[in-house]
Image (cartoon, rainbow, N blue to C red):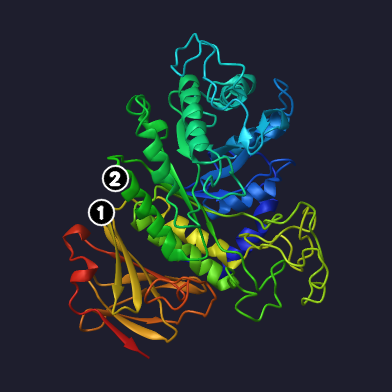
């Protein structure tokens, strides 16, 4: 397809008007099995058809959201499923797969920062050994909640039977907590998390053997390798081998610095390999908040004011670069955080008119986290005063571009290469083409001479129409690479002068038997020149 950003922006803006009726698998949406978006749907209020239409228009195949224990079971054995019943039903009605996070703790299960009864046996016979006819231990409230949630939402479960769903409709991915290595989410310690994971795994697999249990997505915001520490605990468990070490999928989170997305996937794979484990790895949160658009701090001038924030252009570049790094290192699924700004990390109800910093003298929040692919609507609970409510940012175009090119592609090999220490080149070799993702990592405009293997290629850039290009008489593609834009990310890797590189371009070159073509590092004629 030809990539014409202006027309796609119009399509994305108008999509809700064409999606007021229930969607089904017959709709012309990609629903990429490799791409998801966090918080497509809302937990405590009805999710509009508009939100679903926007996510589907971008090519998302997955939704990720938290199932809060404290919301569904505020008192023992008193379950309130209505909000989540609607959420699950609407996700499935729109053809989305679900990555559900089991998280939260009701007051009756609180023991300081810990979960009361977590270290009690799983089963009423005083053991952790599963058998179909065994009752759960009533003194372990966590396992009783896990059982209730999975029985409710598994394929063939309580809701599926009530709604008459097909045999495979329901939740099959259960993530055990969110960012347990980040104290604001988990303060109960490493041993309690290992126990949380083990008990959830045993209960989930007993109820739905085909379910997949995910280790809670790790932020790695310190030097502490939480995954390795949990594996060291599980290594001493005599039942670990029989229970797949109590998880099927590992997950990581990364923000603002694209390089870390690939590094974290590699780091987790190496950690697993140290224990002779091979498991899928998901990047199920990634993104960067913008500072140059409401509700971000649009008045920001200093590096400290812009710390860990990006421009709207850089947010779009981030997603392409982050996705390329992560997929090249073997990530199975990638999520962008998030569909709309919603409330960001601010309290529910946070709202204010656009301003230039003049209201920041008080104690209340005067800016928010603008993570969204879309700006909030005028009816949003938070940040509802954008002068272009409900419209897409450039990152939405980047997401759709990755969905079109890499969302369903099957490649045989991939490679990350740095040319002359100045240009990042990532390649994906499919059965019939080589896909290049290329960007400038310096502050100066550069020209890249890239050896050709065919007669032409398709060149994709975010803010320009797609065009066919041909090599010159020396069989070289000449590519102009704009410079990166200065940002204020700390702790950069050697050679990086910014976290987000310059505007990425994607080159797709049809090649017969691309696996027989030399890898990019073997090209002798590749040349980087200053303009």
Camera-nearest label, 2 or 1: 2
Front position in the image: 413 or 136: 136
Left or right, residue 258 beside residue 310: left
Q: Quadrant of residue 93?
A: top right
The N terminus lies in which quarter of the figure? bottom left
Report the residue that reaches farthest toward the front: 112
Q: How many circles with numbers are drawn on the protein? A: 2
Front position in the image: 386 or 310: 310
Q: Which mark is residue 273?
A: 2
**Residue depicted at x 52% and y 32%:** 196
Relative height, residue 320 to residue 82 (above, below) = below
Which numbered disc, 2 or 1, marks the residue that appears first in the sequence? 2
Q: Quadrant of residue 308?
A: bottom right
Front position in the image: 242 or 291: 242
Structural crowding at the residue carrying mark 1, measured as other residues with C-alpha within 10 Å and reported as few (<14), some (14–19) or many (≥20): some
Report the residue that reaches farthest toward the top: 133
The residue tagged 1 is: 431
The x and y percentages for residue 339 are 62, 54
**Residue depicted at x 46% and y 70%:** 491
**Residue depicted at x 33% and y 44%:** 272
Report the residue that reaches farthest toward the bottom: 531
Distance from the alpha carbon under mark 2 to that under mark 1: 28 Å
Relative height, residue 142 to residue 113 (above, below) = above
Q: Secondary structure at mark 2?
A: helix
The x and y percentages for residue 13 are 66, 60
Instruction: Examine the rendering and report whether any part of residue 274 can be seen.
Output: yes
Q: Secondary structure at mark 1?
A: loop
Relative height, residue 3 to residue 201 (above, below) = below
């Amino acid at each position: 397809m030809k990539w014409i950003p202006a027309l796609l922006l119009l399509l994305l803006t108008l999509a809700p008007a064409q999606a007021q009726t229930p969607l089904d698998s017959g709709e012309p949406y990609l629903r990429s099995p490799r791409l998801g978006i966090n918080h497509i749907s809302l937990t405590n209020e009805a999710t509009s058809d508009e939100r679903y239409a926007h996510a589907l228009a971008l090519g998302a195949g997955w939704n990720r959201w938290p199932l809060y224990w404290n919301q569904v079971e505020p008192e023992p054995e008193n379950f309130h499923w209505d909000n989540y019943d609607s959420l699950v039903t609407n996700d499935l009605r729109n053809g989305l797969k679900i990555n559900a996070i089991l998280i939260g703790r009701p007051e009756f299960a609180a023991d300081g920062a810990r979960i009361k009864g977590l270290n009690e046996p799983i089963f009423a016979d005083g053991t952790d050994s599963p058998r179909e006819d065994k009752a759960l231990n009533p003194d372990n409230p966590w396992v009783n909640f896990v059982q209730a949630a999975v029985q409710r939402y598994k394929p063939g479960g309580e809701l599926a039977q009530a709604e008459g769903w097909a045999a495979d409709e329901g939740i099959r991915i259960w993530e055990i907590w969110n960012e347990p290595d980040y104290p604001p989410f988990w303060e109960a310690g490493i041993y309690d998390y290992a126990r949380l994971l083990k008990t959830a795994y045993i209960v989930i697999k007993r109820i739905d053997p085909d379910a997949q249990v995910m280790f809670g997505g790790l932020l790695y915001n310190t030097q502490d390798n939480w995954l390795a520490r949990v594996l060291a605990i599980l290594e001493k468990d005599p039942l670990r081998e029989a229970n797949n070490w109590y998880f099927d999928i590992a997950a990581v989170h990364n923000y603002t610095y694209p390089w870390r997305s690939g590094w974290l996937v590699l780091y987790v794979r190496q950690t697993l390999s140290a224990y002779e484990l091979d498991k899928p790895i998901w990047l199920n949160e990634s993104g960067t908040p913008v500072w140059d658009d409401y509700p971000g701090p649009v008045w920001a001038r200093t590096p400290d004011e812009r710390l860990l924030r990006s421009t709207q252009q850089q947010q779009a570049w981030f997603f392409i670069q982050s996705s390329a790094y992560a997929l090249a290192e073997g990530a199975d699924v990638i999520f962008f955080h998030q569909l709309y700004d919603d409330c960001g990390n601010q309290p529910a109800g946070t709202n204010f008119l656009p301003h230039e910093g003049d209201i920041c003298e008080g104690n209340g929040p005067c800016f928010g986290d603008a993570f969204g692919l879309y700006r909030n609507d005028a009816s949003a609970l938070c940040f509802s005063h954008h002068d272009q409510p409900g419209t897409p940012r450039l990152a939405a175009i980047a997401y759709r571009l990755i969905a079109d090119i890499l969302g369903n592609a099957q490649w045989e090999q991939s490679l990350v290469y740095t040319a002359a220490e100045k240009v990042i080149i990532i390649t994906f070799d499919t059965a019939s083409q080589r896909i290049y993702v290329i960007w400038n990592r310096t502050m100066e405009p550069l020209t890249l001479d890239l050896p050709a293997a065919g007669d032409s290629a398709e060149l994709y850039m975010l803010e320009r129409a797609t065009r066919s290009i041909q090599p010159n008489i020396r069989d070289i593609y000449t590519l102009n690479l704009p410079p990166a834009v200065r940002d204020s990310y700390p702790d950069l890797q050697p050679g990086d002068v910014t976290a987000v590189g310059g505007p990425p371009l994607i080159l797709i070159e049809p090649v017969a038997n691309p696996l027989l073509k030399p890898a990019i590092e073997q090209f002798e004629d590749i040349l980087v020149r200053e303009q």
